[in-house]
Image (tube, rainbow, N blue to C red):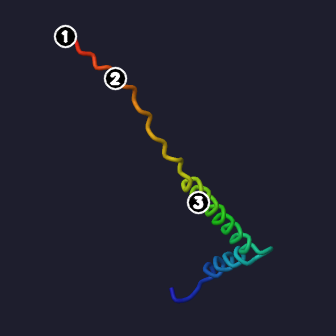
Amino acid sequence: MGTFGPIHWIILGAIVLLLFGGRGKLSSIMGDAAKGVRAFREGLKGDDEKSETPAAAQPLPSPAPEKDTVVR
């Protein structure tokens, strides 16, 4: 367990190639993550704007007066 075997070095090399190899894959991965966070924040801002403008309070309509019919 104290030393790295050949399999460990192959796995480590594959990880390094995925992250740093070719055309800036790490920066493209982080760019995509940043776009997702930005879209999430914009979505939250849109919800807040809608909830901050409540409709004006309207008085309740007065009910029609009920006729008091007395049966004698």
- In this rendering, the answer to whether 63 lies above or below 42 is above
Q: Kindly identify the amino acid type of the residue bearing the numbered disc 2.
A: Glu
- The label nearer to you, 3 versus 2, is 2
Q: Kindly identify the amino acid type of the residue bearing the numbered disc 3.
A: Leu
Give the mark nearest the N terminus, 3 or 1. 3
The answer to which quarter of the image holds residue 21 is bottom right
Residue at the disc numbered 2: 66
Residue at the disc numbered 3: 44
Picture residue at 54% right of the left edge, 54% below the top? 51
- In this rendering, the answer to whether 72 lies above or below 48 is above
Horizontal relation, residue 42 to residue 63: left or right: right
Mark 1 in CB contact with mark 2 (< 8 angstroms): no
Q: Position of residue 53 (x, y in %)?
A: 56, 53
The answer to which quarter of the image holds residue 39 is bottom right
- The label nearer to you, 3 versus 1, is 1
Residue at the disc numbered 1: 72
